[in-house]
Structure formats: structure tokens, C-alpha cells
Amino acid sequence: MSRRRRVYKKEEHVDSRYGSPAVARLISTVMKRGKKSLAERIVYTAIE
């Protein structure tokens, strides 16, 4: 019998413009030093 606690899956965040979790992950990957708005601008211009 294990004494470890159950590990719950984290809630997946979605992108505000496209509603896609894949785009949200891409924005998080591009983001540096917490500059999320800059990362969003870079990703959105690359997609369009």
C-alpha cells in the first residue's frame, strides 16, 4: 500500500485569441523573463 498522495493533472490553459492549448504552450515556450505580451505578439505575427 502506497503512502504517496495522488497526483492530479494540472488544468490546461487555452489561448485567448484562438482558444488553443497548443498555442498557449508555444507562447509559454517563447516567453522570456515573464514578458508574456511580447511573446504573444511574436507568436501571433508569426501565425498570420
Image (tube, rainbow, N blue to C red):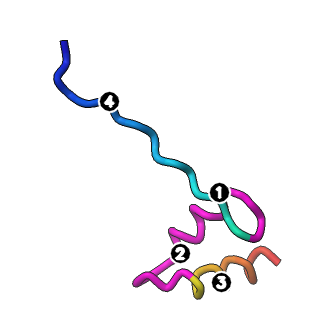
| Marks 4/2: CA–CA distance | 31 Å
Residue bounds of the magenta highlight: 17-36
Near mark 4 (Cα within 10 A), the count class, few <14, some 14-19 or many ≥20, is few
| Quadrant position of residue 40 | bottom right
**Image quarter (top left, top right, bottom left or bottom right) of the C terminus:** bottom right
Kind of residue at badge 3: Ile
Q: Tell me the element at label 2.
A: helix
Q: Position of residue 22 (x, y in %)?
A: 65, 57
The residue positioned 76% from the left and 70% from the top of the image is 17
Rendering coords of residue 32 (x, y %): 44, 81
Q: In the picture, residue 34 is in which quadrant?
A: bottom left
Residue on which the image places disc 3: 42
Label 4: state its secondary structure: loop
Query: Dividing the image into 4 quarters, which one contains the N terminus?
Result: top left
Query: Of the residues under marks 3 and 1, which one precedes in the sequence?
Result: 1
Q: Amino acid at mark 4?
A: Arg
Residue corresponding to mark 2: 30
What's the amino acid at mark 1? Ala
CA gap, disc 3 to disc 1?
15 Å
Q: CA distance from mark 4 to mark 3?
A: 38 Å
Q: Which residue is mark 1?
A: 22
Give coordinates of residue 27: x percent, y percent: 58, 71
14 over 12 or under it: above or below: below
Q: For mark 1, give the secondary structure.
A: helix
Q: CA distance from mark 2 to mark 1?
A: 12 Å
Q: Residue furthest top?
A: 1
What residue do we see at 67% from left, 85% from top?
Answer: 41
